[in-house]
Amino acid sequence: MFKKILVANRGEIAVRILRACREMGIASVAVYSEADRRALHTRLADEAVFIGTAPADQSYLSIERILQAARQTGAEAVHPGYGFLSENAGFARAVKQAGLVFIGPPAEAIEAMGDKGAARQRMQSSGVPVVPGYQGPDDDATLVRKAAQIGFPLLVKAAAGGGGKGMRVVNEAGELEEAIAGARREAHHAFGDQRMILERYIPRARHIEMQVLADAHGNVLHLFERECSVQRRHQKIIEESPSPFIDEELRRRIAGSALLAARAVGYQNAGTVEFIVDPECREYYFLEMNTRLQVEHPVTELVAGLDLVQWQIRIAAGERLPFTQAELSQRGHAIECRLYAEDPANNFLPATGPLLRFVEPQGPGVRVDAGYTSGDAVTIHYDPLIAKVIAWSGDRPGAIAKMLAALRETVLLGLTHNGQFLQDVLGDPDFQAGQVWTTWVEDKFGDWQPPQCELPPEVLAAGALLRLQGQADASNAEPSGADPYSPWRNASSFRVGKGGV
């Protein structure tokens, strides 16, 4: 087993990985940018190394600076988390060439699934169903001709990248050329790659994904599905397991295709195979494979009873999976809500500023994976995800009720956030009946506004005091890395707070 791991990330996922290392008795190294000099992940790590200025390309996306931090601290392995360099095959190779272990899949698997057009072709040849569409030469004239053959509505989609960027729904031929141009511009800006593919658009589709886990000894297992249909701007905000939509027969079929996909690319470590399901005919189609840990991995951890981050580390260290598919089962129901600093009433515009007060919900069956504490600041430089709130209960109604209670208990002052919006979504009769689809949020909550209420004078006064205190703390804070007096420095398995499993 590794003695020291460097976490090449920030925010809640860095904190999550650091806590897994702590439980395993593994020393940890955090890296941080100027904007994250006193961030939570730097305070929790055993060591913290400054790697550059706030822009990600000068810090968290700098392969050389991350490897230099690993070399100077004596780290043996690198965990990329999600986002940033996690699906960068060049980074995976560079880690290996530096004599370190990349805690993730082989670079070849990342490359195979990173190009959506090539991945479609590979899946087709492996017997995995794909959405009818086109990949190949993508000059505008060819795309227009192929679109007419596929029919409308369809998706114009970036061949590289993900997260809904470089994607346009085209309802009729007259919209196509503008959609291609817009998608190319967005894809070039986001990924440096403006190649396009076409796919048939499935109205009211369900988004179902399968968690897979594979070791270096030929064992490939699935850890069941997650339903991720509640999205805004093609990005997930609520995930759950089991899905309220699929039955055992459909679960078995989708799981079989997920295992085929993983084996087709020689996959190792944790990964997720995503599918679109047509609710009318209950047919499913390969969407993409995320060759990394997912944001929503906690719901699988709670229903499967496994720590995915620890198993990522164990697999990278060469351990064999000690259980079989028949020994795994889904237990109860888990729901995750992503708590963002954003304004749902203004097209989910990100919010920035100091987090004056953050009180996490507590209680049996409630878990919080947070990247911030009171006094921290959400900046313009990174994703505005503050925390993930996860609730587990014996059944879906119980999990919804527990999640609603947890969100009501959450205190978050100083920033606009989506807490009330999440409560309204969870309380909607359609959601409670499991009748949702990938555009349901836009269809149902497109004109959502928060309830109007006037705060008592004493609450306003308390908020003003907190803001002044936050400004004073920020001006008096001395830049530093890890806290030299932190209990983490002298504790190999001691854990403070919540967020681990």
Image (cartoon, helix red, strand yellow):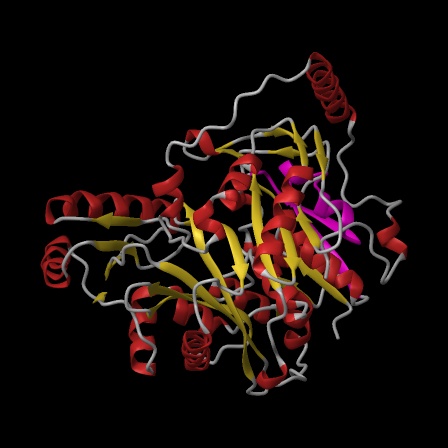
> In the image, 192: left or right of 419?
left
Q: Give the range drawn in magenta.
A: 26-54
**Residue beneath the point at 70% across and 41% down:** 39
Image point 52% across, 46% down: which residue? 426
Q: Position of residue 243 (x, y in %)?
A: 49, 63
| Residue 248 pos. (x, y %) | 46, 76
Residue 96 quadrant: bottom right
Residue 99 in view here: no
Q: In which quarter of the image is residue 149?
A: bottom left
Residue at left offset 65%, top offset 38%: 408
Which residue lies at the image location 42% right of the left edge and 52% below the top edge? 163
Q: Residue furthest top?
A: 457
Relative height, residue 439 to residue 119 (above, below): above
Residue 49 belongs to the span the image colors magenta:
yes
Looking at the picture, does residue 60 appear above or below residue 395? above
Between 162 and 448, the one nearer to me in the picture? 448
| Residue 405 or residue 47, whichever sits in front | 405
Q: In which quarter of the image is the C terminus?
A: bottom right
The quarter of the picture where the N terminus appears is bottom right
